Amino acid sequence: MKDLGLLHYFLGLEVWQQTVGIILNQGKYTIDILKRFGMMDCKPMSTLMETNLHKLREAGASSESVDSTLYRQMIESLMYLINTRPDIFYVVNALSRFMCEPKQLHIVAPKHILRYLRGTIGYGLKYKEVDLNLYGYTNSDWAGSVVDRKSTSRCCFSLGSAMISWFSRKQSSVAQSSTEA
């Protein structure tokens, strides 16, 4: 065995160990994604996505089909990035629903995320030694899906100021009230 010192880079994950805590980042991987899809020179966006997700669901037969392989590659690349970027988790999860038959409107959304990432390359998770309290938050919309009227539940846990676990999933049954959702 050989001591290689502190961990700096592992499977696309950058680890910065400082006296105030540990920072996890995927900046190099983000740059690789931007280069791969030709978005390195794009204009950065300050918002993650448009507020109306229902527009994506309504992109039916009237929209043109696009290369599903390209769309899948974009979504799968973004899925690996959510290890240190919980801010994009919900949007990537919502876009992954259209991987079978993406339309022209669907291909615009991951490009919007890539433009957002262009402006936030340095973002990541920071674990401080000072605040190691465990916090949990949960949320649910009521009949958020216009297609089947099912609700989406979301939950996240943070250790101090950094997210350690999160999920977002559609509920298996239709809620009859906001309390039940």
Image (cartoon, helix red, strand yellow):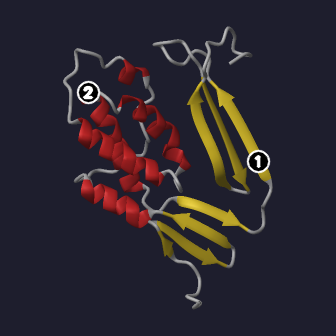
Residue 48 position within the rendered picture, expressed as x and y whole percent measured from the top left: 44, 41
According to the picture, the residue beneath numbered tag 2 turns out to be 103
Alpha carbon distance from label 2 to label 1: 39 Å
**Left or right: 8 in relation to 27:** right
| Amino acid marked by disc 2 | Lys
Q: Secondary structure at mark 2?
A: loop
First along the sequence among labels 2 and 1: 2
**Left or right: 123 in relation to 181:** left
**Left or right: 128 in relation to 104:** right
Q: Residue at x 70, y 34 (%)?
A: 138
The residue positioned farthest toward the front in the image shown: 1
| Amino acid marked by disc 1 | Tyr
Instruction: Specify the quadrant that holds the C terminus.
Output: top right
Q: Estimate how packed mark 2 is, as few (under 14), some (14 to 19) or many (20 or more) residues with alpha carbons within 10 Å.
A: many
Residue 69 visible in the snapshot: yes
Q: Residue at x 70, y 51 (%)?
A: 158
Residue 6 position within the rendered picture, expressed as x and y whole percent measured from the top left: 59, 82
